[in-house]
Image (cartoon, rainbow, N blue to C red):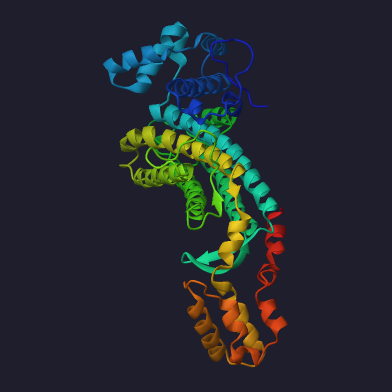
Amino acid sequence: MPRRCTIGRSHSPTPTVIERYTLPEMGNIWTETAKLKTWLQVEIAVCEAQAELGYIPAAAVEEIKAKANFDPKRVLEIEAEVRHDMIAFLTNVNEYVGDAGRYIHLGLTSSDVLDTALALQLVASVNILLERVEELSQAIRYQAQQHRNTVMVGRSHGIHAEPITFGFKLAGWLAEVFRNRARLVNLRSSIAVGKISGAVGTYANIDPRIEAIACQNLGLEPDCASTQVISRDRHAEYVQTLALLAASIERFAVEIRNLQRTDVLEVEEFFSKGQKGSSAMPHKRNPIRSERLTGMARIVRANAVAALENVALWHERDISHSSVERMILPDSSTVTHFMLVETTDLVKHLLVYPENMKQNMNLYGGVIFSQRVMLALVEKGTSREEAYKIVQSCAHEAWNKPGGNFYYLIAKDDRVTAKMTTKEIDDCFDPQYQLRHLDLVYQRLGI
């Protein structure tokens, strides 16, 4: 079992990074106090590794572990003078530790602590996101099961196409959530990397074994080839993965917004008692949560561009990435977390209107069954070109006209009735034909 350091106590081990952040709010990971705690966790892990290898006295490490502490306000006071956050932090820690503090940060550069601690924050964030993704998948799974046979029209280009079920639509969402979950699992491994290799990463003043021991005790892997910093492609991958997740949520939100339109109204966000939709129009029931999700996805997506621009640093390091990451990593993490929580609640309480779905599907006398009629005519010996011409003429005559009825026009067309019986025509308008293979998708998803 990896050894763990203690902050402010000489006994009882410090929890793992996962245990340290047990509250569901993502923001707890990204507070100033949490950041400084993680810095101290890294510093003490390095001290323990150095003591294990005989570089510093074991008694000094115990004293450091017993006394080490910090005051965020005091750190800021010192930073205002020295203009260096890590030096300010170490100065404040040494005010608590005393003489044994001279063993803290031996052979390290600031980025050893900053980047390793940041990895702990990112891993903790991914763990929380995975929990929320699982909750979202369960909410979608439930609705997909409930509406497995709720028939509705499928649309392409925003135009009625052929029958599907609402559960089938949700199954597509669930598959996408599964892919995002797999990306997060892979990301957790990619981002769980520390570096304790000193200035420019050459281990000139630090034994590489110290890095190995400290990283192991922190639950991280040593970066295989760091410079003075951990290369920022890893952090770009983090934000890009979150941007993909946010983009998926946006897709779901846009679909809900479209299906809630007054002229569609097949699903609707839950509208609570006492809720108001408009200050001017009392009738309004607006998809405000879906619209909010759409807007927040833009923030995470924009942050991905900034993360990519952070990859190209000068030589072995500069700090042009630092100011960017102080904004985009907490913001992307907390915004994505909120989006997951919001989407889960939205899906759980989604209002679904099967009767409206049925009514929309049968607009203009079932024009959405045009392909089935065309193929039936081809099976009866009509050329595909002629069958297409017959069906299209009837569909366009019925399309978007008051009282337009595609079924009636097909049923009385001599070119059709010469080939097909009334029952054969009726069979073309049975949506179960188009839905007969949907169970395969459910089997693939395990629902």
Please report the residue visible at 42 percent of the width from the left and 24 percent of the height from the top. 107
**Viewer-proximal residue among 284 and 294:** 284
Q: Nearer the viewer, residue 333 or 254?
A: 254
Q: Is residue 336 left or right of residue 302?
A: right
Residue 40 lies left or right of residue 88; in this view the side is right
Q: Quadrant of residue 10?
A: top right
Residue 187 appears at what percent x and percent y? 54, 44
Whole-percent x and y of residue 348?
61, 42
Tell me: residue 7, above or below residue 353. Answer: above
Frontmost residue, 445 versus 54: 445
- Residue 76 appears in view: yes
Report x, y in % for residue 40: 48, 20
Residue 9 position (above or below residue 238): above
Q: Residue furthest front?
A: 403
In the picture, the quarter occupied by the N terminus is top right
Q: Position of residue 288 (x, y in %)?
A: 45, 42
Identify whether 362 is placed above or below 170.
Answer: below
Query: Which of 93 and 257 lies nearest the eye of the viewer?
Result: 257
With 302 as the anchor, is 141 left or right in this view? right
